[in-house]
Amino acid sequence: MMGPSGRKKPRVATFIVLCILSSICACKAQFKPADNYLVDCGSAKSTTLGQRTFAADGASPVTVSTSQEILAGTSANGVASFPNSALYQTARIFNGPSSYTFPIQKQGRHFVRLYFFPFVYQSYDLSLAKFTVSTQDVLLLNDFQQPDKTAPLLKEYSLNIARDQLVISFKPSNGIAFINAIEVVSVPDDLIGDTAQMVNPMQQYSGLTTQPLETVYRVNMGGPKVTPDNDTLSRTWVTDQSYLLNPDVTKKVAYGKKITYKKGGATDLTAPDIVYGTATELAATNTSNALFNMTWQFDVDARLHQLFDKISLL
């Protein structure tokens, strides 16, 4: 869509719900991202989390454009209980329109992950911040305010980048904006297929490969939580227990053997072996004529399109 000035209006990211219910399938797929930028915003030194290292803020080749350098920090004790707590000890604060620029070595689909945790630094109360985040083409967050002031928030997007640079812009709505950490990482271009079956109306949708997507849920059915160090693309998978409406009629099962992927199908880049190797299934009951089903409930924004991917059964 073109705006009055002839510039492209930013598109709003479509939500994507990622749920792997169970397992098929492993020749070990190898993938080395052409772009792998991890930035610990507000930090003067690099930060290592497991097998990944986040560079100091402002380290080459990533550049920052801002009117004033405000690098904030908080006590480690205040964030010690959070996953990836070291990333939430620092933040970069913006008091005017600002941006990070990332050189893109290989155009195509990338994960863009934004980390947020508000704390008080000098006269800046980050819990009051309200701001917009966008790229050159996509509106990521509009008038964003941290929903839970006491917990960190990770926003993950899957964007098809067709430029030599990715510019992530922050625009304060009420005085300040902030960011704790940023990831911009290449992913396999075929990770998201181009077509999907729509539910209402019942028809095929084409053009997913160019759509901006936001991850809402990534759930490992019947298995443990999976952290970035144990995922082929540094993703986080949560367990399904909190989403089950009637967990008493279900049970967890494990494959217990080596996962063997079928040629032309899923690989361990689609999901790691630990995801494909576990499942939630309907438990046996003593009532032969009773009707039971497994139901998961996910809260979503009804104004947005949802992409559900992917179900594979043992």
Image (cartoon, helix red, strand yellow):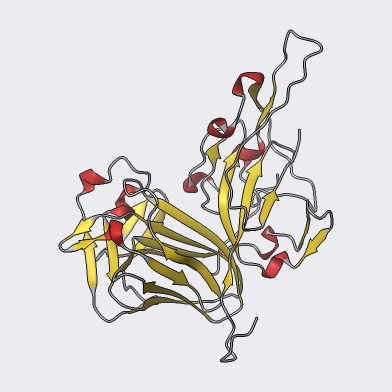
Residue at the extreme left: 122
Classify residue 204 as left or right of residue 137.
right
Percent coordinates x, y for residue 173 in the rendering: 36, 71
Q: Quadrant location of the C terminus?
A: top right
Name above or below for residue 250 compared with residue 210: above
Percent coordinates x, y for residue 278 in the rendering: 64, 32
Count the marks: 0
Name above or below for residue 206 compared with residue 202: below
Q: Quadrant location of the N terminus?
A: bottom right
Percent coordinates x, y for residue 291 in the rendering: 77, 19
Q: Quadrant of residue 189?
A: bottom right
Classify residue 242 as left or right of residue 174.
right
Residue 232 showing in the rendered view: no
**234 or 66: nearer the viewer:** 66
Residue plotted at (73% across, 7% down): 286
**130 or 43: nearer the viewer:** 130
Residue 139 showing in the rendered view: yes
Name above or below for residue 289 compared with residue 33: above
Residue plotted at (73% across, 49% down): 266
Percent coordinates x, y for residue 110 in the rendering: 57, 66
Residue plotted at (32% across, 57% down): 47
Residue plotted at (37% across, 49% down): 152
Residue at the extreme bottom: 5
